[in-house]
Amino acid sequence: MREICHSLVALERQVFDFLGYQWAPILANFFHIIIVILGLFGTIQYRPRYIVVYTVWMALWVAWNVFIICYYLDVGDLTKDSDLLTFNISAHHSWWREHGPGCVRREMTQPGVGTVDSQSYISVMGCLMEYQYIEVLHSGTQILIALLGFVYACYVVSAITEEEDSFDFVGGFDPFPLYHVNEKPSHLLLKPMYLST
């Protein structure tokens, strides 16, 4: 259930990053969804290695979301007005910048240009919440879910490995078995044969 919730939140974020042409978050979300599916598979199939991969990715995912928070809050040299998240390919920004809750968009065409396909200036007014805080809330939610997933994955890996360590098959590593298997007599051992020519 945890992985499914995590996938849905990541999928929701993926949609809004696609709408804003934010290529770095699109790639990160894509890998995140793949790793969450791998972690779900590892949990269902009792594969601790897959769950460990999921756990390591959750640590990286938390670091990525901390970076996104710093990016949108203009921490250090990072600035939300840069084209870093679009790999400097385009001047697109967060979809929430123009479509946030309560935002009113007004497109103003440039004087002398009358075509619909031309570049136009967009003014946004009346937003209930600035777009950078919406992005920070998204990243904060991702961090919270990732930390819960990290703790749960650590628990599942420890439970699976503990279960594997405590498993004892009949005649296994028990120093005092219930029955004693007689060893083969020495005359049954294989000996090399030499052919004479």
Image: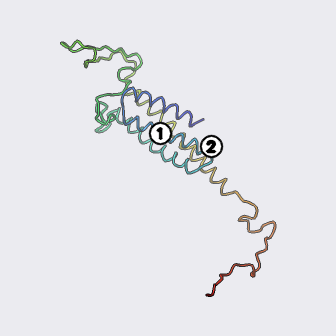
Left or right: residue 11 versus residue 118 is right
Q: Residue at x 76, y 75 (%)?
A: 183
164 and 130: which one is in front?
164
Residue assigned mark 1: 32
**Residue at point 52%, 36% (across, down):** 145
Query: In the shown orientation, is residue 69 left or right of residue 122?
Result: right
Does the CB distance between marks 2 and 1 fall below 8 Å? no
Q: Residues within 10 Å of mark 2 (few under 14, many from 20)?
A: few
Measuring from the top left, give residue 10's x and y in whole percent: 48, 33
**Label 2 vs label 1: CA separation?**
18 Å
Residue at position x 72%, y 64% in the image: 172
Position of 113 relative to 47 (above/below)? above
Residue closest to the far left: 112
**Which quarter of the rendered picture does the N terminus lie within?**
top right
Relative to 116, say whether 75 is above or below: below
Which of 51 and 23 lies nearest the eye of the viewer? 23
Q: Where residue 29 sits in the image (x, y, percent)?
A: 44, 36
Q: Residue furthest front?
A: 197
18 over 64 or under it: above or below: above
| Local secondary structure at mark 2 | helix
Side (left or right) of 66 relative to 110: right
The quadrant of the rendering that contains the C terminus is bottom right
x, y percent for residue 155: 60, 47
Circle 1: element type: helix
Residue that badge 2 annotates: 44
- Label 2 amino acid? Ile
| Label number found at residue 8 | none
Q: Position of residue 193 (x, y in %)?
A: 66, 82
